[in-house]
Image: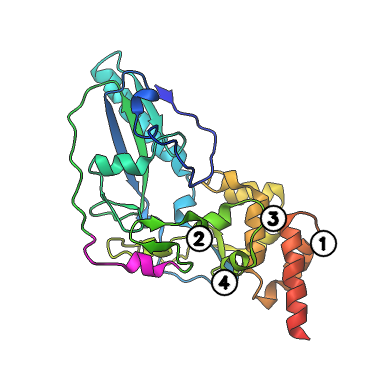
Amino acid sequence: MQRLATRPRPPFVRWEPGYCCAPERWLPGAQSVLVGAVSYGHRYGKGVLSPRQGYFSPFAHRPDYHVLVREKLEALGQYLCALKPGTRCLVQVDSGPGCERIFALLAGIGWQGKNNFIIVPGHGSFVWLGMLVTDLPLPADEPLPDACGDCRRCLQACPTGAYSAPYQYAHQRCLAYWASRKGGLSAEEAKLLGKYRIIYGCDFCQLACPHNDAGNHEGAAGVDLADVLTMSPARFRELFGGTAAEWRGRSVLRRNAVLASAANTELRPALAQVAREQGPAAEWARRVLEHADADDV
């Protein structure tokens, strides 16, 4: 059993043209690509964030979907190898050059929604995708027909206008992209991340989709802002170790927590504590507090 490169990579990577659809370039002699979809809709609750919470998308909760989906696909690969000894397989879960959504669409796992997410009948778009490439020839499935009709709820739900039209998506306008990006943020980006209290991930377009049915539990998809603001490296590992957000690191998540705390006066002491440090979170904490002091004058 082989794996494609497993080093973490940022989202929205541009795949080399002509490469993502050439599995024989990943596994010489490749004959088939099997696509797996694992539902995580049950992770979503009906609860609402409290003023002391920031949004942490359920897709990134424990266990890390990279590990969970990979284990399932590797078990499938072992089954194929047992059926036909000598079969070669290679697994990818958001960790290589192939675009899972393209192959999921071709394999009939689901159809492509106007927000570009794959919508699986009965599960919606709350699914993780992974691929198993093999040199075992298998009969092909057919793509599913589009079932979105005239609905545009996902496009209209995006608070930053990242969708100019169906399927026309500017990732540079996505809250999830801003929240995971290292380096500087513009004033607009910082303001909107703070307004929606985004710590990691963004689900506006998916939550608006009528094909998605969030779970029935009462919890909200939130993390305690004061805890994230003041977390030590050890506390970071406790909170985010083993999640899909761990790769992004403590510094970026704390920066996002600073922005999400800007409007909450109860969190000023925690912000002041962060402001006495060094780094991106401290720099933004000082800006937030200076702006708050100016408003109080």
Of label 4 and label 3, which has the lower sequence position? 4
Q: Which residue is mark 4?
A: 195
Of label 1 and label 2, which has the lower sequence position? 2
Label 4, label 2: how many angstroms apart (C-alpha)? 15 Å
Circle 1 SS class: loop
Q: Nearer the viewer, mark 1 or mark 4?
A: 4
- Local crowd at mark 2 within 10 Å, few (<14), some, or many (≥20)? some
The segment highlighted magenta reads: 148-158
- Local crowd at mark 3 within 10 Å, few (<14), some, or many (≥20)? some
List x then y, in percent, for residue 282.
76, 60
Q: Residue furthest top?
A: 86
Label 1, label 4: how many angstroms apart (C-alpha)? 24 Å
Label 2, label 3: how many angstroms apart (C-alpha)? 29 Å
Q: Residue at x 80, y 55 (%)?
A: 278
- Local crowd at mark 4 within 10 Å, few (<14), some, or many (≥20)? some
Q: Which residue is mark 2?
A: 173
Circle 4 SS class: helix
Q: Residue at x 73, y 65 (%)?
A: 285
Q: Residue 276, which numbered label?
A: 1
Q: Quadrant of residue 279?
A: bottom right
Of label 4 and label 2, which has the lower sequence position? 2
Of label 3 and label 1, which has the lower sequence position? 3
Q: Nearer the viewer, mark 1 or mark 2?
A: 2
